[in-house]
Image: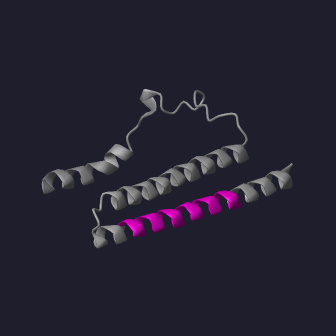
Amino acid sequence: MNKIITSLLLLAPMAASADLSDLGYDDLDSVHLGTQDLKTTIASIINVVLGFLGIIATLIILLGGFKWMTSQGSTEKVSEAKNLIGAGVVGLVIVLAAYAIARFVLREVYQATY
């Protein structure tokens, strides 16, 4: 196993410096990066990331509720579930605050540049 890893590490610089012009990878005319404004693209990325984080925080809250419901009265499991729910709520508050701050900053950037 060590020989395989060593040979891959030794061959990696040669693969990185390979000439790919024969395969058409040097053609930048066919690359379409989009037609939206950069500010709109950044706002879309921020919204998607914060939405994903909000979903994760909500899933943590749901997981805590599930653990609480299936704890069967065990105080250790109930306290673990309470900690999960508390962490999920704190995470959700942080995500919502980040969304509000990002929305405010992006709105101010729009107004300052137009």
For residue 8, side relative to residue 56 (left or right) = left
For residue 37, side relative to residue 14 (left or right) = right
Q: How is the image coloured?
A: one colour
For residue 108, side relative to residue 90 (left or right) = right
Instruction: Report which quarter residue 85 is drawn in.
Output: bottom left
Q: How many marks?
A: 0
Residue 19 counted in the magenta span? no
The residue lying toward the viewer, choosing from 7 and 51, is: 51
Residue lying at 62% horizontally and 59% vertically, measured from the top left: 96
Instruction: Report which quarter residue 54 is drawn in.
Output: bottom right
The residue lying toward the viewer, choosing from 94 and 12, is: 94
Which secondary structure type mostly characterizes the magenta part of the structure? helix
* Residue 99 x, y percent position in the rendering: 65, 57
For residue 86, side relative to residue 47 (left or right) = left
Segment tinted magenta in the rendering: 81-101
Residue lying at 20% horizontally and 53% vertically, measured from the top left: 5
* Residue 30 x, y percent position in the rendering: 58, 27
Residue lying at 29% horizontally and 72% vertically, measured from the top left: 76
Answer above or below: position of 39 versus 25. Answer: below
Residue 90 counted in the magenta span? yes
Identity of the residue furthest to the front in this view: 73
* Residue 81 x, y percent position in the rendering: 37, 65
* Residue 51 x, y percent position in the rendering: 57, 49
The residue lying toward the viewer, choosing from 75 and 80, is: 75
Answer above or below: position of 37 versus 68. Answer: above
The residue lying toward the viewer, choosing from 48 and 37, is: 48
Residue lying at 30% horizontally and 72% vertically, measured from the top left: 75
